[in-house]
Amino acid sequence: MTTENILRRHDLRRTSNRTAILDVFVAQEVALSEREIEEAMSQTCDRVTIYRTLNSFLERGVIHRVLDDSGVMKYALCAADCAHHEAHYHDHVHFKCRMCGQTTCIEQVQIPKVILPEGFALEEVNMLLQGVCPECRG
Amino acid sequence: MTTENILRRHDLRRTSNRTAILDVFVAQEVALSEREIEEAMSQTCDRVTIYRTLNSFLERGVIHRVLDDSGVMKYALCAADCAHHEAHYHDHVHFKCRMCGQTTCIEQVQIPKVILPEGFALEEVNMLLQGVCPECRG
DNA sequence: GTTTATGCAAATTCTTTGCAATACT
DNA sequence: AGTATTGCAAAGAATTTGCATAAAC
C-alpha cells in the first residue's frame, strides 16, 4: 500500500509533508519520536508541523503511541487491520534496546491476555520489553 | 515499615524532604509524577529537590519508573522484596484510568511470561493496561 | 471558494545543571 | 569536619498555541 493510499483511506489531505513523514515510518520499522523523524527528514519540515501531523495521524488511526520510559513520546505505524478492532487494539509487544535506544514492534509475539479483578473496564493493553537487541549483542 | 526505616535501609540520609516525599508515596497508593508530588506537598519543597530525590530513590531501588503514554514520567514505591531480585524486577501490571488519570499498581495480577525470538536479551518487562477503574465506573 | 495545513514566533511544561548555603552523619 | 542535600536561578528539551500565508479539495 502506497503512502498516498494510506492518507486517502484515513481521510487525510495528501500533502508533501505528510507523505514524507509517512515514508519515514515505512522506511524505518521502529517506533519514532518527533526528533527522530525530524532528523530522518533532514529538517525539510518544521517541528510544529511534525507534531501536528503526528496528532492527526493518531486521531485517524494511522499510527499509535508506543510506551517509553525515557520521557519522550514515540509512535509507530498501525498494522493494516488495526482500525478494524474497536478501541484500536494493538496486540503485539514492543522491545526497546538499551544499547541502541531503538524500539521495535515484535509482531510475532502477541501480548498475553490478563484477567483483571472485577470492576475494571479494559480498553487498551501495552507491553514493553527492555534489554539488548540481537544487533547490539553482536 | 516507617519511612525513616526505608531511608536507612537504602543508605539514604534522612532529611525532612525525603521523609515527606516518601510519605506521599505511602499515603497515595498510586504512581505519581513530580507534579503530583509537588501538589500533595503543597509547595513545601522545591521542584528541583523533588526531581533529585526521585532520582536518588530510583538509584537506590526505593521506587521504580511506571510507564505512561502521556509523556510525563511516573514513579511508584517498590515492594519490600523488590531489591532481592536481580535487575530490579517488577512483576505486576499497572492500570491507568482514562477518567481520573490515576495509575495504580495491580499487585494481584502478575505479568505473564513472554518468549522472545532468538537473540534478544530480556532485562525488564512492563505492562500497562488502560481503561476505566472501578471507582470511575461507579 | 472554502476548508485545512504550514511556518514562524512565542509560550508552556518537564527536566537537568551550577553554585553557594545549609543540613546530615 | 566532611560529605551530601537543598534552594534559587538559569538553561535545555519536549510540546502546544496563535496567527497570517499557502496549499488541498
Image (cartoon, coloured by chain):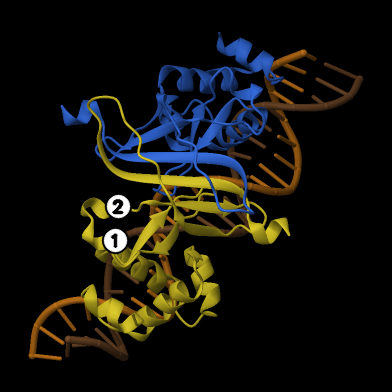
Chain colours: A yellow, B blue, C orange, D brown
Q: Are marks 2 and 1 in contact (CB under 8 Å)?
A: yes
Q: Mark 2 vs mark 1: which is more N-terminal? A: 1
Q: Residues within 10 Å of mark 2 (few under 14, many from 20)?
A: some
Q: Name the image quarter holding the N terminus of chain A.
A: bottom left
Dot 1: chain letter? A
Q: Nearer the viewer, residue A16 or B16?
A: A16
Is residue A36 depicted above or below B43 in this figure?
Answer: below
**Residue that carries the numbered disc 1 in the rendered image:** A82
What amino acid type is highlighted by mark number 2? Tyr
Q: Nearer the viewer, residue B73 or A115?
A: A115
Q: Which mark, by number, is residue A133?
A: none
Marks 2, 1 in one chain: yes
What amino acid type is highlighted by mark number 1? Cys
Q: CA distance from mark 2 to mark 1?
A: 7 Å
**Residue that carries the numbered disc 2 in the rendered image:** A89
Residue drawn at x 22%, y 60% is A84
**Residue A124 rendering spot, x and y as whole percentages:** 31, 45
The image quadrant that residue C25 belongs to is top right
The image quadrant that residue A26 belongs to is bottom left
Question: In the rendered image, is residue B133 in sight?
Answer: yes
**Residue A5 rendering spot, x and y as whole percentages:** 28, 81
Say left or right for C14 vs B96: right
Say left or right for B125 vs B40: right
